[in-house]
């Protein structure tokens, strides 16, 4: 397996802190995100490399293994277990210098699992669990989506249910690192980063937005068209509606994860907008209204 410099990909030094890694990843992920670079194969490749690098370096345990074992970091547990076995084995067994192997780990696995010496002791080892980060747009998770992403150089195509939340972790059995000597594969843990560039704020399954209301409709009432996340609805506005008034649209929020045909609610806050650039006639009418109100008529 060819060595990949994840620090170079994320444009950070090896001494970078967790916050510096996160900051650099978010900046680069936005820069090369496919939504912002449609039909750009180079950006797509770069985006996948950035995600792969972040999967390793954002996890302190994986980063430690990567720093120590390089391209063989995914086999760190097996390497260390073999070293422990070598140190505890009675004299006369195969040894590696001071009790730990320090050469090319590919050769290490070949020698330990019978590639050269005909070793008959075939211990089964479960593969390493893999943690991955997948960045999606909020509109991508409003409906069930098929997504293809790259983990450890392998393309994985999966269908994700609607309603996934930012920071949510999904476990995918058997899609981690391969086991050794017939051992089971590890699992894949995907952490989702959901980018929201809409006018809707999401909290759980509920959505929140602000709708501008002109002064005349606010005072006299009427009907307006309001954008929901997946369409528009017509709303009746009561006369004398105040700025800050909230309206709930039941079932117009975000889909409930893994629950078919169930949605959260949409909460609308009205913001009354005062007219500007008034004409002389408009000012006269407003003054007339002011005088009427002040005299109690």
Image (tube, helix red, strand yellow):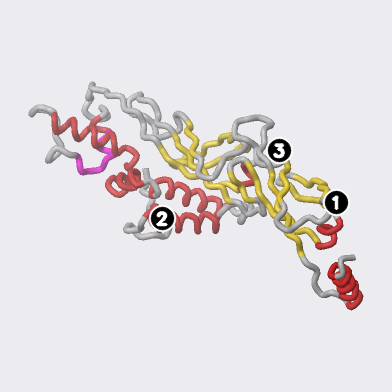
Label placed on residue 251: 3
- Foreground residue among 170 and 233: 233
Marks 3 and 1 sit apart, C-alpha to C-alpha, by: 20 Å
Which of the 4 image quadrants contains residue 19? bottom left
Q: Quadrant of the N terminus?
A: top left
Residue at the image point whose x is 22% and y is 43% from the top = 103
Label 2 Cα crowd, 10 Å radius (few <14 / some 14-19 / many 20+): many
- Foreground residue among 32 and 251: 251
Marks 3 and 2 sit apart, C-alpha to C-alpha, by: 39 Å
Would you say the residues marked 3 and 2 are in contact, meaning their CB atoms lie under 8 Å apart? Answer: no
Using the image, determine if residue 198 lies above or below residue 81. Answer: below
Label placed on residue 223: 1
Instruction: Check if residue 71 falls in the magenta segment.
Output: no
Instruction: Check if residue 106 falls in the magenta segment.
Output: yes
Give the residue pinned by disc 2. Answer: 21
Which type of secondary structure does the marked residue at label 3 adopt? Answer: loop
**Which x, y percent locates residue 273?**
76, 64
Residue at the image point whose x is 45% and y is 47% from the top = 52
Residue 43 as seen in the image, left or right of residue 60 = right
**Which x, y percent locates residue 255?**
65, 37
Give the residue furthest to the top.
120
Residue 225 as seen in the image, left or right of residue 43 = right
Of callouts 3 and 1, the N-terminal one: 1
Residue 60 as seen in the image, left or right of residue 272 = left
Of callouts 2 and 1, the N-terminal one: 2
Which of the 4 image quadrants contains residue 280? bottom right
Which type of secondary structure does the marked residue at label 2 adopt? Answer: helix
Label 1 Cα crowd, 10 Å radius (few <14 / some 14-19 / many 20+): few
Bounds of the magenta segment? 101-109
């Amino acid at each position: 397996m060819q060595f990949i410099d994840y620090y170079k990909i994320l444009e950070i030094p090896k001494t970078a802190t967790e916050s510096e890694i996160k900051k650099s990843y978010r900046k680069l992920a936005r820069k090369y995100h496919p939504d912002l670079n449609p039909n750009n194969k180079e950006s797509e490749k770069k985006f996948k490399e950035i995600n792969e690098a972040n999967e390793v370096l954002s996890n302190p345990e994986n980063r430690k293994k990567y720093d120590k074992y390089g391209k063989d970091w995914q086999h760190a547990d097996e390497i260390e277990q073999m070293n422990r076995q070598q140190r505890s084995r009675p004299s006369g067994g195969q040894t590696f210098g001071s009790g730990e192997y320090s050469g090319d780990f590919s050769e290490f696995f070949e020698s330990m699992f019978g590639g050269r010496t005909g070793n008959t002791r075939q211990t089964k080892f479960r593969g390493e669990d893999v943690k991955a980060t997948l960045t999606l747009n909020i509109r991508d998770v409003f409906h069930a989506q098929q997504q293809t992403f790259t983990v450890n150089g392998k393309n994985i195509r999966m269908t994700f249910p609607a309603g996934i939340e930012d920071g949510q972790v999904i476990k995918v059995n058997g899609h981690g690192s391969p086991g050794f000597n017939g051992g089971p594969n590890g699992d894949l843990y995907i952490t989702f980063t959901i980018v929201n560039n809409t006018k809707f704020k999401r909290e759980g399954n509920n959505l929140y937005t602000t709708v501008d209301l002109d002064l005349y409709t606010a005072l006299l009432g009427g009907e307006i068209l309001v954008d929901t996340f997946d369409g528009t609805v017509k709303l009746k506005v009561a006369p004398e509606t105040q700025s800050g008034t909230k309206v709930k649209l039941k079932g117009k929020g975000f889909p409930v994860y893994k629950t078919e045909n169930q949605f959260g609610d949409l909460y609308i806050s009205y913001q009354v907008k005062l007219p500007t650039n008034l004409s002389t006639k408009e000012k006269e009418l407003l003054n007339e209204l002011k005088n009427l109100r002040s005299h109690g008529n």
